[in-house]
Image (tube, rainbow, N blue to C red):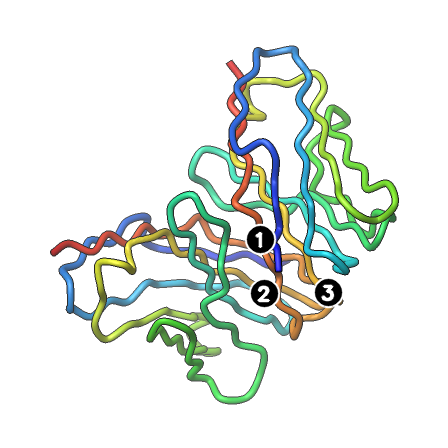
Amino acid sequence: EAGVTQFPSHSVIEKGQTVTLRCDPISGHDNLYWYRRVMGKEIKFLLHFVKESKQDESGMPNNRFLAERTGGTYSTLKVQPAELEDSGVYFCASTLTEGPNTEAFFGQGTRLTVV
Amino acid sequence: AQSVTQLDSQVPVFEEAPVELRCNYSSSVSVYLFWYVQYPNQGLQLLLKYLSGSTLVKGINGFEAEFNKSQTSFHLRKPSVHISDTAEYFCASGGNFNKFYFGSGTKLNVKP
């Protein structure tokens, strides 16, 4: 069974450009999460989808970030326009159900560098 | 609000020695606690979790952690490490909706 897959694995863009990150969760997982780790600091929650609906987007840093999950399958996270402080590793995770008894599976992350 | 503090950013240790990675949490409500490991170029992998019950939790690869409510700690231990344990380890707290609060990570470097 395929795990959580993220594309691309690395992205280097210039300040002001647009970048779109993609996450393919494990098939059948209704819950999808985005996290970000900036400069070796803690991994921080960005948002949570249940199917195609945003359950919690309290961690989204500002309106330059747009997350979508059309059809409740894969998700995209678009940064437009990118700023230097957006550099970091973006992780995606998925779970079958909500609740602590369900294991969260993480992708390998997308390393975004804004120059 | 929940938060997690990992006191050591890097821990060097020789192979076959014991290791303890420290984690303290802060929460005004009941929490669930987790340890994740990230090997190079891989995603985060669950090592173990504490939800309730026995305060000593055993995980994969010989790791264990002890939940200490009075000290608000959830330290990770392994009695004898291997080279293959070299990775970054993350402590996390979470609630009912899998929204994790992670620490800043501890890089474990096992030397031969």
Quarter of the image with the N terminus of chain A is bottom right
Q: Residue at x 71, y 68 (%)?
A: B96
- Name the mark nearer the viewer: 2 or 1: 1
Q: What residue type is labelled 1?
A: Phe
Residue A11: give x, y in percent of width and height: 54, 24
- Name the subunit of mark 2: B
Q: What residue type is labelled 3?
A: Leu
Residue A42: give x, y in percent of width and height: 49, 45
Task: Confirm whether circles 2 and 1 share one chain.
Answer: no
Q: Is residue B84 above or below residue A76?
A: below
- Give the secondary structure at mark 1: strand
Left or right: B29 with respect to B48? right
Residue B57: give x, y in percent of width and height: 44, 81
- Give the secondary structure at mark 3: loop
Q: Name the residue under label 3.
A: A96
Q: Residue at x 33, y 75 (%)?
A: B62
Compare marks 3 and 1 and give the one earlier in the sequence. Answer: 3
Q: Mark 1 points at which residue?
A: A106
Left or right: A12 with respect to B59? right
Q: Residue at x 58, y 78 (%)?
A: B51
Q: Mark 2 points at which residue?
A: B27
Q: How far apart are marks 2 and 1 (CA)?
A: 24 Å
- Name the mark nearer the viewer: 2 or 3: 3
Number of marks: 3
Quarter of the image where one finds residue B1: bottom right
Q: Distance between the residues labelled 3 and 1?
A: 12 Å
